[in-house]
Image (cartoon, helix red, strand yellow):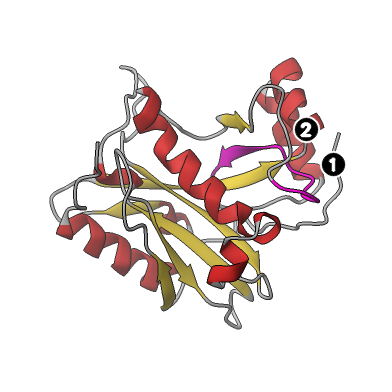
Amino acid sequence: MAAAGQRQEVAEAIDRHVATHFGPVAFVLHEIASHLVGVHVYVVGPSAERPYQTLVTSGMSERPMTVPDGHGISPYAELMLCLPADWPLTQAALHDERTGWPVRVLKQVARLPHEYGTWIGEWHSVPNGDPALPYAPGAPFAGAVITPMLNVRPEARTIDVADGTRITLLALVPLHPAEVMLKVSQGTDALIAALDRGGVSELLDPTRPSLV
């Protein structure tokens, strides 16, 4: 089924939020055709305050996620991650598995709750298959965990739409295979402790070693 067009007021709210909290959008990686929801990716270039590229999805929140009763969280979410200032985002780079995988993973995870009638929230992990395999040749990461953003002011974590809708903006943090297994075997607290020890945030360090 083709994705419905994004509601204008939602798109405008995300536009304003990105500009306010991350900076002017350098360009948008548009999704021309998609099923369920069309996930576009806003790219904010490096600045003195944020010397890296910030990528934010727009489209995941077009439909509510299926959040179980009693969780008390918004059924609307978008995702983000940050890439080094020199990470290539040209069309050629996006079509190269070695450099295009972060954008591909953002879009895949943004569509996941709508494809499977589920939801994604803080500290949910998403392995890349079973068994989890690297996202691309030479990439050490084989899964991701959804976390709160760290390198932002608290008000950046929620996008408010004029109609009263509240969208939670969450970070996507790639994980090594052993880190994916740590969460499965020892739980969320063990993974949080490991990531804290390593100073891991929403800024991707493509060369960081496994913390397990």
**Identity of the residue drawn at 51% across and 35% down:** 122
Q: Which residues are magenta?
A: 136-148
Q: CA distance from mark 1 to mark 2?
A: 8 Å
Q: Give the residue drawn at x 63%, y 46%.
A: 173
* Circle 2 Cα neighbour tier, 10 Å, few/some/many (<14 / 14–19 / ≥20): many
**What secondary structure predominates along the stretch shown in magenta?**
loop
Whether residue 120 is visible, yes or no, is yes
Q: Quadrant of residue 151?
A: bottom right
Q: Quadrant of the C terminus?
A: top right
The x and y percentages for residue 211 are 84, 39
Q: Hey, what amino acid is under mark 1?
A: Ser
User: Regarding mark 2 in the picture, which secondary structure is present there?
Assistant: helix
Residue under label 1: 210
Is 183 magenta? The answer is: no
Of residue 196 and residue 104, the one placed in the foreground of this image is 104
Type of amino acid under label 2? Pro
Q: Secondary structure at mark 1?
A: loop
The structure residue drawn at horizontal position 44% and vertical position 33%, both measured from the top left corner, is 112
Neighbourhood count class around disc 1 (C-alpha, 10 Å): few under 14, some 14–19, many 20 upward: some
Up the image or down, 198 lies above or below 144; here it is below
Let me know if residue 146 is in the magenta part. Answer: yes
Q: Which residue is mark 2?
A: 177
